[in-house]
């Protein structure tokens, strides 16, 4: 066995590149499909693409709102100098509502307890009442909804907050003809009518996310909240969107090994013949799911190469089938797929998960371009 050839000069490490033109094209497509306003959902660091990066691209190409989960995410957008309306929809009752409202962040209110907390803050919040339209997850149940609407109207009359919106969310919109979609739409329409009967006048009524915006015109009210679609992920599988993310890593070392060489933890792979192996400096801590060991591929030196042995925390080994590769040459872990490289969708398939989990799972030490 020969000694490994080591990189002789510093090389850039693993890197994530975002294609701004792809974000722009996707945003324009959704802006065209949305008769009302388009809210760009940039939670979880913009689905791993950078919250401010996605926000700026979306705002430049047709979005007029931003949506995030937590108040902290909303305040981070404000700290970037972004001034457009922002909605934060999932917070514990003791969250920092004062800072949110002080920074002009709208708040979703999913329960009487949240309404009381926001009311007690006495800060003139702009509120979107959140109705559970069939997921038993976030949002008030239909049983609680009439009381929530009445209490919100009382708070509004006393001047401590304003109800500007009503929101819901569909659990099965990726399957366009699932009967749960029609049921969810009906619950939402009932919820809006109930709010109006309580004296509320919510201008913003939003139910659709990516899939419903692409497949279900009946669910489009006055705004759509679109996240995955902006970064090129279509859970409904109906529309060609542009993937925006490329993950690459340099070869650290390349070694020639004889047949029978065992690779990695647990020796789960044994070279079936003499071959060459390349080492890449990223692993499951950087977002490569360990469960894809033995299935995953990367693009390196002109073709697909198998990841062999177990994926480690910080490194993976790639079988080069006897080819030699210079240290520093870059492997493409995933990209749009145009050059033959694996896509995020393929990684999701190897990991038996959805693309969302792959793009939001890239670790903090991967450098963002
Ligand atoms: C994540 C999320 C969205 C965006 O959904 P996509 O399918 O990614 O467009 C919209 N609304 C809520 C409440 C969400 O949690």
Image (cartoon, helix red, strand yellow):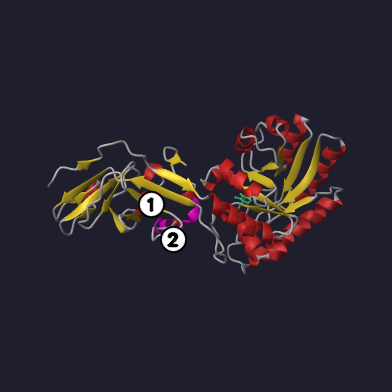
Q: Which mark is residue 186?
A: none
Q: Characterize the local packing of mark 2: few (<14), some (14-19) or many (20 or more) Cα atoms within 10 angstroms.
A: few
Q: What residue appears at the point 60 percent right and 38 percent down from the top-left corner? A: 73
Asked if residue 134 can be seen in this view, the reply is no
In the picture, measured across the screen, residue 336 lies left or right of residue 124, that is left
Q: What residue appears at the point 79 percent right and 43 percent down from the top-left corner? A: 163
Instruction: Place residue 215 in its image quadrant.
Output: bottom right
Return the disc, 1 or 2, that comes first in the chain's sequence: 1
> Ligand 1 near label 2 (Cβ, under 8 Å)?
no
Report x, y in % for residue 365: 42, 37
Which of 308 and 353 lies nearest the eye of the viewer? 308
Report x, y in % for residue 169: 66, 54
Looking at the image, is mark 1 or mark 2 nearer the viewer?
2
Q: What residue appears at the point 72 percent right and 33 percent down from the top-left corner? A: 101
Report x, y in % for residue 69: 61, 43
The secondary element bearing badge 2 is classed as loop
In the picture, measured across the screen, residue 3 lies left or right of residue 354, that is left
Region of the chain picked out in magenta, as a range: 345-357
Q: What residue appears at the point 85 percent right and 49 percent down from the top-left corner? A: 198
Q: Which residue in the protein does label 2 denote?
A: 338
Q: Which residue in the protein does label 1 denote?
A: 333
Asked if residue 23 can be seen in this view, the reply is yes
Specify whether residue 121 is painted magenta: no
Which of 284 and 184 lies nearest the eye of the viewer? 284
In the picture, measured across the screen, residue 53 lies left or right of residue 61, that is left
């Amino acid at each position: 066995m020969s000694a490994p050839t080591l990189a002789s000069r510093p090389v850039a490490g693993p890197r994530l590149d975002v294609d701004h033109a792809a974000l722009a094209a996707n945003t324009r497509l959704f802006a065209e499909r949305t008769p009302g306003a388009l809210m760009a959902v940039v939670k979880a660091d913009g689905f791993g693409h950078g919250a401010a990066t996605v926000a700026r691209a979306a705002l430049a190409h047709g979005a007029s709102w931003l949506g995030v989960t937590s108040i902290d995410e909303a305040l981070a957008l404000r700290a970037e100098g972004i001034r457009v309306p922002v909605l934060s929809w999932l917070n514990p009752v003791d969250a920092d509502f004062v800072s949110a409202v002080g920074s002009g962040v709208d708040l979703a209110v999913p329960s009487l307890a949240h309404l009381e907390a926001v009311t007690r803050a006495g800060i003139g919040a702009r509120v979107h009442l959140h109705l559970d339209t069939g997921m038993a997850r976030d949002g008030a149940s239909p049983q609680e909804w009439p009381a929530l609407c009445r209490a919100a109207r009382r708070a509004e009359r006393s001047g401590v907050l304003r109800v500007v919106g009503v929101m819901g969310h569909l659990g099965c919109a990726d399957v366009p003809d699932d009967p749960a979609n029609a049921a969810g739409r009906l619950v939402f329409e009932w919820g809006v009518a109930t709010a109006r009967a309580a004296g509320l006048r919510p201008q913003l009524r939003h139910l659709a996310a990516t899939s419903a915006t692409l497949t279900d015109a009946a669910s489009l009210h006055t705004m759509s909240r679109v996240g995955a679609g902006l970064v090129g992920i279509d859970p409904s599988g109906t529309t060609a969107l542009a993937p925006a993310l490329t993950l690459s890593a340099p070869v650290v070392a390349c070694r020639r090994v004889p047949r029978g060489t065992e690779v990695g933890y647990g020796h789960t792979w044994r070279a079936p013949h003499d071959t060459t192996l390349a080492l890449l400096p990223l692993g499951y801590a950087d977002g490569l799911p360990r469960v894809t060991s033995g299935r995953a591929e990367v693009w390196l030196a002109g073709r697909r190469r198998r990841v062999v042995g177990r994926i480690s925390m910080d490194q993976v080994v790639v079988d080069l089938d006897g080819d030699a590769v210079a240290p520093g040459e870059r492997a493409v872990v995933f990209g749009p797929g145009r050059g033959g490289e694996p896509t995020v969708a393929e990684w999701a398939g190897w990991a038996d998960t959805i693309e969302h989990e792959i793009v939001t799972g890239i670790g903090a030490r991967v450098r963002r371009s």
